[in-house]
Image: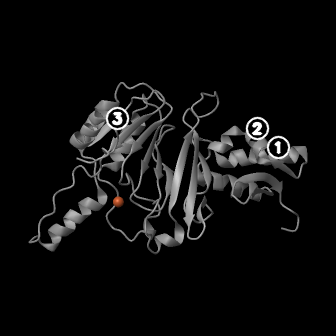
Amino acid sequence: MLTPSFPTDDPILVAQYWAEGFYVDDRDPGYRILNINTCADFPSHPGPAASQDDVDAHLLHVERGSISVDRLAKIEAALQGLEPKVVNIALMHHHPVEHARHDLLKDTYGPATNGEKLLDLLERAVNCGRWMLVHGHKHIPNFTVDGGSAYSPMVLCAASVGGHLWQPVAAVARNQFHVVEFETARTLGQPITRGKVLSWAWSFGHGWRPAPPTTGLPSEFGFGALNDPRDLADQVAAALDARGVEFDRWSSILSEYPLAQYLGPVDMSLFEDRLETLGYLLERDRQFAVTTVARKATWT
Ligand SMILES: [Fe+2]
C-alpha cells in the first residue's frame, strides 16, 4: 500500500519482492539487479507478556536479518540460465558476512543468517558475470572481496547518508554517499567488471565534500583488479628509476599501467606503501585525488 511503490516502480517486481522476498530486475540490457528483502522472515513481536529471553531472541533476529535456505534455492534457480552482463548488483539491507570493523560497533548479533551462503551462490553464478553486493545497516562504510576465485563477489558496505552516528563509530566515519561507476567497454587485458567508487562526506558547516581521509571510504577508489599491488608498484618504480626522472603525472602512470586504477582501497594502500619503500611518494590535490608520483626528497 506504499505510495510511491517500494522498492521499484514495476508492479510485478514489487509484488515479487513482498511475496517471495527478492526479485531479479533484468529489464535493462546494461545491468542486472538482484534485490533481496533480508527482513522478509522477521517474526512478529512475542507480545507484552513475553519473557526477556523471548524478546532478546526476537531482537537478535531483527538485528541480523536473514536469507532462508528456501529463498536461496529460489534465487539460485532465478539466476540459472541468465546471460552474462558486466554489471550485476545484489542489493540488501543487512551485511552478508561479519564487518571487518566489528570492534567499533558494540554489537553482538553478527551478519545476516545464511549471508555467506548467498555470497557463495553469487560466486558460482558465473554465467551472470561478476557480482557486487551493496548493503547498509553498519554505518561504517567498507569495501571487501569475499570468496576464493576471480569471480568472488565484491561487497560494498554503504555508509549512512543521514544517520546520527554514535561513538565510537563517529570517530572513524561520517555520513557519506557513494557513486559507483562501471566501465562497460570490453578491453582485453583488463577485468571484465571494473570501475570506481566515488564518495562524499558530510561535514557540519561545510556540507558535502569529496571524502577526506578518516571519514570512511576514500574520495575515490577502484575495483575489479586482481593484480598484486606490490608487483605493480615495483614496475612503476623500476620504470621511473630507469628513466632517471624525479616525478611523473599520475595520468601518465595510469595510461602505462591501467590496472592500477582498478585496485581496491586496501590494495591501493599496499601499492602506496611499497612505492614509499622504493623511494617514491604519491602526491594529492586538495580534493585528495592523486596527481603525481614523485621521488622522495633526500631530506625526508
Ligand atoms: Fe539496519
- Label 1: element kind: helix
Position of residue 246 in the picture relative to residue 263 (left or right): right
Q: Going 32% across and 35% down the picture, which residue do you hit?
A: 10
Q: CA distance from mark 2 to mark 1?
A: 10 Å
Q: Quadrant of residue 165?
A: bottom left
Count of numbered marks: 3
Task: Specify the amino acid type for callout 1.
Answer: Ala
Q: Is mark 2 within 8 Å of ligand 1?
A: no
Identify the disc placed on residue 24.
Answer: 3
Q: Going 45% across and 62% down the picture, which residue do you hit?
A: 162
Number of other residues with Cα within 10 Å of mark 2, as a class: few under 14, some 14 to 19, many 20 or more: few
Position of residue 79 in the picture relative to residue 254 (left or right): left
Q: Label 1 belongs to which residue?
A: 239
Chain-order first, disc 2 or disc 1: 1
Looking at the picture, how far across and down is residue 34, in whole percent?
Answer: 37, 39
Query: Quick one: 197 or 58, which is closer to the camera?
Result: 197
Looking at the image, residue 247 lies above or below residue 63: above
Task: In the displayed orientation, state which residue is furthest to the bottom.
Answer: 167
Task: Specify the amino acid type for callout 2.
Answer: Glu
Q: CA distance from mark 2 to mark 3?
A: 39 Å
Position of residue 115 in the picture relative to residue 255 (left or right): left
Looking at the image, residue 289 lies above or below residue 22: below
Q: Label 2 belongs to which residue?
A: 256
Task: Specify the amino acid type for callout 3.
Answer: Val
